[in-house]
Image (spheres, coloured by chain):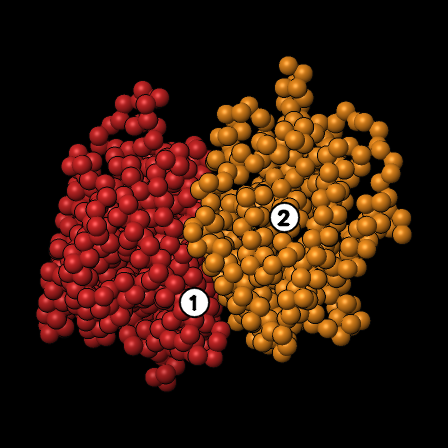
Amino acid sequence: MNIATNPMPGKKANKLSATRIAGKLVNDYWEMVWRAKEEGKLICWYEGSAINPFLEAADICWVHGEAYSAMLAARHQEVKAQQVAEERGYMRELCSYARTHLGCAVSNQRLRGDDTGAVPDDDDLTWKLPAPDMIISAYAYCSTGQQWDEMTSRVFGKKVPIFNVSLPWIWGSKPDAGYLKGQEWEETSDYVTRQLNDMVKFIEEQTGKPYPWDRLYEMMADIKRASELRLEAMELCTAQPAPASFFDWVVSIAPINNLPVAGVKNYFETVLDEVKARVAAGEGCVPDEKYRLFFDGIMNWNKVGWLANKFANYDAAVIAGRYTHMAFWQEPGLINPNDPVRGMAQNYLICPNNHASPILIKLIMDLCRKFEVDGMVIHASRTCRAFTNPQFMIAETAQRELGIPSSMFEGDVTDESFYKDEVLNSRVEAMLEAIESRRMSVVA
Amino acid sequence: MDRSDIIARFAEVAQDPLAYAAAWKARTGKQVIGSFPMNFPGELAHAADTLPMILQESDEAITVGHGVLFPFYCGYTRSMVDQAASGKFDVLDAIMFGDHCVQLLGAADAIRMKLTDTRVIFFQLISSMCDPWTQGRSEESFGKLRDELEDFIGAKVSDAALHASIRLFNKNRALIRKLYEMRKAGTAAIRAVEMQHVVKSSMIMDKAEHTDLLQELVASYTDAPAADRNVRLHLSGHFCQAPKPELLNMIESCGVTVVGDDLYHGFRYISTDVPETGDPVAGLARWYMDRNTGVPCPTRVQNNVDWEAYLLDAMREEKADGMIVLMAKFCEPHMYYYPEVKEAFEGAGVPHLLIETEHEGMAMEGLKTRVETFVEIVKRREAA
Ligand code: SF4
Ligand code: SF4
């Protein structure tokens, strides 16, 4: 088959219908955020690590910066925020999550500040993000996370209290080093645990109330269960055809990562049921699964549906990814709901980038083997270097160890202008042809 | 040696750091430890009887490095992986670093994979500078580095040796600061590129050898230069890599005298001394923290310190009329902080010009026009 000249037009991804619920949960959550000030809630801005249960338990409204930027991009309303940021001097090569979110901060300051006289438009989501009463910075691996928070605090005139949690990178050079093991892992876990306990004291200072640990314990029991359900459903995607795709898991990030805990367990129960039913019925996430692919890189939030359909059209099931399958309460076994802080610290330390290459690449290769992928799509996200850092090494290792080809395309998390459709098409087509010829040679 | 010979020697080392290291190694039979900027305590490696050198961006075009890091990384990190992948770092016995700019982590990770025979040691320095535990955590990190070094050389690094290295490094820094003072006061005409040679070679050369030459150099400025009518400018920014000499020369050719800077290959590197008494590791941690209050760095976060305020103060002291910001293309920490600087300078009515620099070189003619225009603006403002 000549893939390049004979694409089957019109095939669409067979999305999990449960993911529609995610859409509703996300909308409800943002409505809650937009109401929070009126309801007299304290608001905390944070990025990166899912510290939201710590905040939700204390009745603080939590606003995850990436989630806000991703939501704007998914609704195609990100450009305004990015323009505002650019006007203040934030350059286009900066992390577009951060730029978009900083644009919201600048816009908020201008329009809510008492010196401008500008009238905010209520439909303008750039402006609508409520200003923080506190900022907590807890970003694994990427130095940008911490700088973004610091600059946010400066946009708000340094009047908002900020608390920094430092999450060291797991360099893993000692003989005992490995995934979730070794002295470095244990020491780092202890160090972050100590800081999280101090963070709780900071939260107590802000709320003026003793910290409600029991509520946190309950929430973490729910999150642990939700995570187990999610992983079980992901595991079932070893089936051929795969019942759910990387894009379904992308849509399911918000529920596991930053939505109110109450609805999360139910959501993943529904997802798991649907995935099981699909496996039983032999129903796949694309109409005709001919290729199974791994997706390396962060998501292109303005392109989720577009990419899902594009790959479906190529008969390619994108099954697993570094972004979805190596993060977000990824190790529920580490969480003891009656004493969760250390397990939470450890889950923060397993962001998909926070282990240096030898450990990280091994995890990726294991996933590729498990899901029996034929190739790898690599999204070189222009402004997220945290994800692009090891990508050449990942591609090389996949070819060397597994004999699978990869295709790289340039895009970005939330800045559409970096996305190049033609490059993606031609590279994916070349990769699929390579997969085909490899199959032919195996048959011959 | 006379003044021009000394500067020529510094320039020679600055231009080919790895050749210096190879010659030093052949001469002494000792080990060379490369480090990444900007907060490596060379004192520790020096006390371990090795040559610590801060690895420098090379002028060479990136070739094999293209297959390791994407083109949208800063020139420093791309040059590092390129040099590593093309065998240029063979002279190094180990690489050590503690800074964790995300691009640097990518480069370090790739370098470890490429240089399988070179030990690459990472000790993550806390970058949040005003937490109650910053000093303690920094001590732990430097303590770990000391352990790793001892393990690497197979011997203990004594407190006495470390104190001696600290004294030597302090002396070296103090001498360079003296040059800065003289330039600011107008008692020594030191061109920007010469200052870069002085500082950059200090990052590379054996400290005692460098210090001896520096002493001679400082002593050589007995003749106060004639006053000029140039515009006095401060150069700001440019972290891990040195601005290209031709860029500095071009700027000064536009009727500019550079009277101060906070470049890493400049005042930032030598701004702060390490306490000479007490526990030396605690002293290094103190130095690490003091450096950021001395010359604030956007790669750190410290809510109670403002780089822009520092810059405005420094310029008042230097009697500088304007500032040129040199920003290495794709340098994220710098890009994050720049809007604060811009806003503060615009608010204070102090002119500045932003120049983005690229590893691959820049169209100097176009830049020259921009600098000339800027100089005119500064002059007009002075005249008004
Ligand atoms: S660059 Fe990537 S990892 Fe870093 S803050 Fe932005 S999105 Fe997060
Ligand atoms: S601080 Fe800037 S120059 Fe240094 S490694 Fe990071 S991006 Fe490159």
Q: Are marks 1 and 2 in contact (CB under 8 Å)?
A: no
Task: In the rendered view, tell whether residue A425 sits above or below residue A438.
Answer: above
| Residue at the disc numbered 2 | B272
Label 1 secondary element: loop
| Quarter location, residue A433 | bottom left
Name the residue at 35% across, 41% down: A161
Q: Nearer the viewer, residue B368 or B126?
A: B126
Estimate the spatial distance between the alpha carbons at disc 1 and disc 2, rounded to whole Å: 30 Å
For the colour orange, the matching chain is B
Residue at the spot of label 1:
A170
Q: Which-is-in-front pick, marks 1 and 2?
A: 2
Q: Find the residue positioned furthest to the top.
A: B384
Compared to residue A218, the image places residue A210 above or below, namely above
Instruction: Give the colour of chain A.
Output: red
Specify the label residue A154 is tagged with.
Answer: none
Residue in the picture at 61% in, 39% down: B236
Name the amino acid type tagged 1: Ile
